[in-house]
Structures are given as structure tokens and as C-alpha cells.
Image: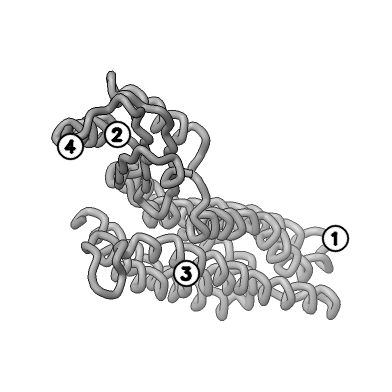
Amino acid sequence: MKEESRALQLSAWMNLGWAALGIGFGLATESTAIMLDGYFSLVGFVMALVTLRVAKLVLQPPDEHFHFGYAQFEPFLNAVKGLLMLGVSGFALAAAVTALLHGGRDVNPGLAIVYALIAMAGCLLVGAVQRRTSRRTGSPILAVDAKNWLIDGAMSAVVALAFGAAWVLGRSPRADLVPFVDPLLVIVMVIAIAFVPLGILKESLREILAFAPDPAIQADVRARVEGSLGDLPVAMREIRMMKVGRFLYVLNQIVLSPEFRPGRIGELDRVRERIAAALEGVEPTPVVDTLFTEDRRWAE
């Protein structure tokens, strides 16, 4: 979709700009917390470029290499994002602990506050735009991207508060505590945001491993399918589902009763049409297969 592509391009270039801003201010202030923010943005830029390609791939039809399409690339990409975020966080945490053990790190709180306020405003604005677009397009990639931007904005607010406290400490009798603010802030940031990449990784792995969707989605789909069968003589039905990226795969295996008369294939096709129509509007987008048989073995 063009709207999704434009949103991803916005995210890519904003990430590049924020990476330059964060790394530049990090070097100027000698703050690892700000450098960490810059590195996150740099990772975001690289992943955004890959995301642009994946967003086009998942909408392409099946081919000779991928007989079921490219939907699985979406959760795989999100899993890679989660792992990269955890990796960057781990390196930053190790550096912060080392700094604490060696007396802390001198920083320039004034410049750090300026950076944090600019970053907070920019990240929250981009996050709000991406979240609105993700809801409009139903894009899981944009939903993860929006979450990342909003988390970045919240963490920038924490950075601003922490360096504000450091600025006050520097003008008090406890100025000796100022060098410990930056490494402590990095540790707090890493701990606070750890749930985000872990959550992304968990959800992505569920989709890669073909877990069933949320119980609420399952109940909704089952009710719609049951209501579509009408007076068809059904002895047994199996409805299986899995969510992969922006698609919900639904396999209906329906065992017909012996009284179903042969030669009514046209009626079965109409049942398929009713089921497909009943599932319109389900989120994520359903991909439906409906199979009929008289032998329970094919459904079990």
C-alpha cells in the first residue's frame, strides 16, 4: 500500500536524522545514554530500509519459491528488530556498569537537556503519526514501528528529567554525584525498555511457529463459520487458524453426514462463498480454505 510505504519512508529518514542528532549530542556531552538513543535510531534506519522491501513482498502473490506467499517475512523481520534492540541494550548495560565501577562519567547536563527535549517532541510526534497510519492500514510492521517511536519519546522525557536533576546536583553540595547520573540512567533505560523488544520477540515467534490467534479472534471466526453452514448436514467440523503478520489463515474441514446427496457440488461452492462472506471484516485479513469430506480421517 502506498500509505504504508510513505509511512515507512518517513520512519527511515527520521531515524537517520535522529541517529545523527543522538550520536552528535552524545559525543558533545560524553553521555552514553544519549549515544544509546542514537544507536537505537541507527538500527531503526537500517531496519526501516529492510522493512520497505518486506512490506512490498508480503502483498505479492505466491510464486514457485514460496507457494504460500511471503506473509512469514513480516514476523521474521519483527523478530530481528527485537533481537537487535536487545543486543544494543546489552552492550549499553555492560558499558554503564563498567562506568559505575570506575567512578562514573562526566557529562554536560545542559546540552543533554536540550537534546532530550528535542528528541522527546520529535519521537512522540512521529510515533503518533505512525500509530494512526497503522490503525488505518492494519499494518503490523507500522504498529511495531509506532510502538518503538513512542517508547523512544517516553525515554527521552526520562533523560530530560534525569539530566535536569544532574544540573541541579551540580549546583549543590552533592556535585560529586553528577558523574553517576549518566551510567545509572542507562541502566534504568535498559531495564525499563527491555519489555518492548521481549514482547516484540515473543509475538513474532508465536507467528513464526504458527501459534493459534487470540481466543477472542478464534471465537469470532468459529461463530461466523457456524452461522454460515445453514442447513447443510454436517457430522463434524474442524476449524483451524494461525496468524502470520497481517493475515489470518483459516482452514475449515467439514465432514458431511451420509444423507448428503452426491452431485451437489454447486451447493458446496455456495457454502464456501457464504463462509468467505461471513469472515469479511475480520482482523487481521482472513485467507480461507474450506474442504468437504465424508470421511472423518481427513479432518482429524
Which residue carries the number 1 mark? Answer: 173
Q: Residue at x 58, y 66 (%)?
A: 112
Quadrant assignment, res 36: bottom right
What is the C-alpha distance between the residues marked 3 and 1? 37 Å
Q: Is residue 233 above or below residue 169?
A: above
* Residue 117 seen: no
Element assignment for label 1: loop
Residue located at (21% from left, 62% from top):
61
Front-lying residue, 188 or 29:
188
Under circle 4, the secondary element is helix
Q: Which mark is residue 41?
A: 3
Task: Decide which of tag 4 and tag 2 comes sooner along the chain.
Answer: 4
Q: Quarter of the image containing the N terminus?
A: bottom left
Q: If you read the primary sequence from the N terminus, does the residue marked by circle 2 or circle 1 appear first?
A: 1
Q: Amino acid at mark 2?
A: Leu
Residue 147 location (% of width, % of height): 47, 52
Element under disc 3? helix
Mark 3 residue crowding within 10 angstroms, few (<14) / some (14–19) / many (20+): many
Amino acid type, mark 1: Pro
Indicate which disc residue 136 carries.
none
> How far, Cα to Cα, is label 3 from label 4?
57 Å
Task: Give the image quarter of residue 206.
Answer: bottom right
Tell me, yes or no, if residue 285 can be seen here.
yes
Q: Are marks 3 and 2 in contact (CB under 8 Å)?
A: no
Q: Nearer the viewer, mark 3 or mark 1?
A: 3
Give the residue pinned by disc 2.
279
Number of numbered callouts drawn: 4
